[in-house]
Amino acid sequence: MDSATSEANPGTTQSASDRPPLLSTAANGLKIVIVGGFGVGKTTMVRAVSDIRPLNTEETMTRAGEGVDDLSAVRGKSTTTIAFDFGRISLNESTVLYLFGAPGQERFWFLWDRLFSGTLGAVVLVDTRRLDECWYAIDRLEAHGTPFIVARNDFGGPRHTAEQVREALDLSEDIPLVDCDARSRESSRDVLLALVHHLYALSTARTAREITP
Amino acid sequence: MKRPGRDEDPDRLYTVTGGRSRSAVGADAFDLVTLVVSESEPVRGMQSEHAAILRICRSPTAVVELAADLGLPVSVIRILLGDLLAAGRITARHPRTVRAADALPDPDILKQVLVGLRNI
Ligand SMILES: Nc1nc2c(ncn2[C@@H]2O[C@H](COP(=O)(O)OP(=O)(O)O)[C@@H](O)[C@H]2O)c(=O)[nH]1
Ligand SMILES: [Mg+2]
C-alpha cells in the first residue's frame, strides 16, 4: 500500500463545535511547521502545546505538483494526497499560531510552496537513532530558504554529543540544535521558543544590515 | 493512489465544486491560516458545504480548520470560499507575516509570538 503520506492519526476528528472558538478579534494567523519522519513525535509535539486536539487534513495534488483545483485531474486520478495534522495556540486577542506536523518525504515538498509559503520557520524533529531520515528535509528547507532549527526528540537511544549530531547532519554552527521530549508541554514550548529566538536574531540582523549598509 | 478510510471519492469532489475546473476570483489568496468570518446566515436551498462553512465561521476559522471539519482537501475548500467571497457572504482576514523587502518575518510579530508562547 502506498501509505507514506497517510500517517495522520485516525480517530482525532472532531466537529467544529467540540473545540473552543477563536475570539472574534482573531485576525492574524501564523504558521510554524514541524517536519520529520514517521513516528518521530510530530503529532505528539503538536498535541503537547496546542489549545485544541490535533486535527488532520489533506491536500491533493496532481503529479505536476499543482494543488487540485482542476477537478478533471482528480477524475483522471493522476493525483496524490498528502496528509498533515495541526493544532493552534492563541497568542493574544488578535494573533493565532498554527502548528503543522508534516511528513518530510519527497513528495511532500511539491506542496511546500502552495501550503507553507509564508511560514515563520520550521522545526526539524529528529530521532537520533534515525538521523539520516531528516537529511532530505534539511536540504529542502535550505533550498526553500525557510529558517529552521533541529530538535532531537529523546527516545532513550544511545547518546550522541551535539558535535556528533551536527556532523552527521552537516549542520552549520548558526543553526540551533536543541533537545526535547515531545510529550512535555514545557519542553515542546521551549523548542518553539528556540525557533522564534532564532528567527528574531535573523530578522533583526537583517534589519540592522538594511539600516547600516 | 488512495488513502484508506477517508471519503475522497473524486466524484464527491466533483459534485461539491460543481465540476468547476478553476476557482473563483480571489480564491488563491486564501492561505491555510487565512481566518474566515461569516457575514450572513445560511439560507434554504444553499449547497450544504456552503451552509456548513457559514455556520462554522460565525467565529473566525482558519481555512485549514474548515478542510478538517468538512473532510475535504484544502484546494476544494478554497474553491468553496471563493464562491462565498464573491457573493459577499464571508470576509477573509489574511495573514500579515512577512515584510515585503525580504522573506523573514517582522520582528514585531516575532516579539508577539515570544510573549504569547512564554505565557502558555
Ligand atoms: N519515549 C518517547 N516517546 C515519544 C516521544 N515523542 C513521541 N513519542 C512516542 O512515539 C510515538 C510516535 O509519535 P507521533 O507523535 O505519533 O509521531 P509522528 O508520526 O511524527 O506524528 C508515539 O507513541 C509517541 O507517544 C518522546 O519524546 N519520547
Ligand atoms: Mg503524526
Image (cartoon, coloured by chain):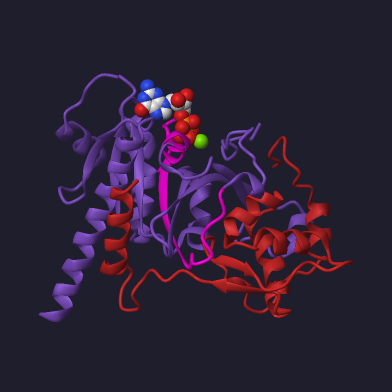
Compared with B101, A190 (above or below) is above
Q: Is residue A187 magenta?
A: no
Quadrant of the drawing holding the C terminus of chain A: bottom left
Q: Nearer the viewer, residue A125 or A11?
A: A11
Compared with A26, A207 (above or below) is below
Rendered shade, chain A: purple
Q: At x 54% / y 65%, what residue is drawn? A: A24
Number of numbered discs present?
A: 0
Using the rendered view, name the quadrant where residue A104 is placed. top left
Q: At x 57% / y 37%, what residue is drawn? A: A8
- In the displayed orientation, state which residue is furthest to the left: A212
Compared with B17, A12 (above or below) is above
Percent from the top left, x then y, of residue A117?
A: 45, 63
Rendered shade, chain B: red
Q: Is residue A41 magenta?
A: yes
Percent from the top left, x then y, of residue A180?
A: 29, 33
Percent from the top left, x then y, of residue A203?
A: 23, 66
Task: Say whether residue B112 is left or right of residue B65.
Answer: left
Using the rendered view, name the quadrant where residue A71 is placed. bottom right
Q: At x 60% / y 62%, what residue is drawn? A: B59
Percent from the top left, x then y, of residue A58?
A: 61, 49
On the question of residue A188 being in view, the answer is yes
Task: Say whether residue A202 is left or right of residue B23.
Answer: left
Q: At x 68% / y 72%, what residue is drawn? A: B82
- Which stretch appears magenta? A20-47
Task: Say whether residue A73 is left or right of residue A2.
Answer: right
On the question of residue A61 being in view, the answer is no
Task: Say whether residue A188 is left or right of residue A175.
Answer: right
Quadrant of the drawing holding the N terminus of chain A: top right
- Image quarter for ligand 1 equals top left
